[in-house]
Image (cartoon, helix red, strand yellow):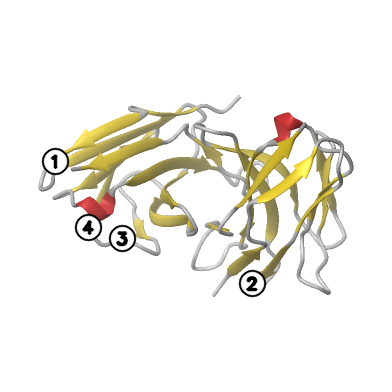
Amino acid sequence: DVKVTQSSRYLVKRTGEKVFLECVQDMDHENMFWYRQDPGLGLRLIYFSYDVKMKEKGDIPEGYSVSREKKERFSLILESASTNQTSMYLCASSTLRQGTTEAFFGQGTRLTVV
Amino acid sequence: GNSVTQMEGPVTLSEEAFLTINCTYTATGYPSLFWYVQYPGEGLQLLLKATKADDKGSNKGFEATYRKETTSFHLEKGSVQVSDSAVYFCALSAGLTGGGNKLTFGTGTQLKVEL
């Protein structure tokens, strides 16, 4: 089974801190994604990556950056955390090798910025 | 652009009741369609999928049929259980265009099943 692992379930950070959210997948998937989930808004795509060192902006990239130095790892960076970035963050991965585009999700990181 | 619209919740049902959660979509090309489920405190899990028109996805008693003529993918279950209480997300994945295989999600529908 595909496993997508996020480094933390819960994080509390102070305003202005630099925050790193880490995600690792173990199925050699080429695609990885970061979403944030907010009540009433569903899931919104922040950034995604097709390959190592490749990244594309999603729908809400402002205030975030990403890094993908290895195929299995995709990091989300909050350069200077703000209270409006308090949210649930979900990492996902997918592949087209089996001709399907379903995504596999990690368990989520609930980030609180105080 | 692509979009997914699903019925607002919360939906509250008694155990063994019939469930329908409506989902309609707007997309160019021929998207794949998905239902994901999120149990409390967890990430999303794929519930079922359909990759072309008239396909029926099914899993754990849930079903959804890909209706291209009505651009819909409604989720149904004949008899819900308390353990089905969760948030359900409809999603689509566009084909290989400039957007790659990004998933676009609806806003989610919370289902609560009571005894």
**Closer mark to the observer between disc 1 and disc 2:** 1
- Which residue occupies the foreground of this view, A99 or B70? B70
Check disc 2 and give the amino acid type: Ala
Query: What secondary structure is found at the residue carrying circle 3?
Result: loop
Asked whether residue B29 is in view, the answer is: yes
User: Which residue sits at x=22%, y=57%?
Assistant: A63
Residue B72 lies in quadrant: bottom right
Label 3 neighbour load within 10 Å: few <14, some 14-19, many 20+? some
- Which residue occupies the foreground of this view, B64 or B16? B16
Query: What secondary structure is found at the residue carrying circle 1?
Result: loop
Gap between marks 2 and 3 measured at Cα: 22 Å
From the image, tell me which residue sits under label 4: A63
Label 3 near label 4: C-beta < 8 Å? yes
From the image, tell me which residue sits under label 3: A61
Q: Say yes or no: labels 1 and 2 on the same chain.
A: no
Residue B97 lies in quadrant: bottom right
Residue A14's tag is 1
Asked whether residue A74 is in view, the answer is: no
Check disc 1 and give the amino acid type: Arg
Label 1 near label 4: C-beta < 8 Å? no
From the image, tell me which residue sits under label 2: B27
**Closer mark to the observer between disc 2 and disc 4:** 4
Label 1 neighbour load within 10 Å: few <14, some 14-19, many 20+? some
Q: Say yes or no: labels 2 and 3 on the same chain.
A: no
Gap between marks 2 and 4 measured at Cα: 28 Å
On the rendered image, what quadrant is the N terminus of chain A found in? Answer: top right
Q: Residue furthest left?
A: A16
Check disc 3 and give the amino acid type: Pro
Q: Say yes or no: labels 4 and 3 on the same chain.
A: yes
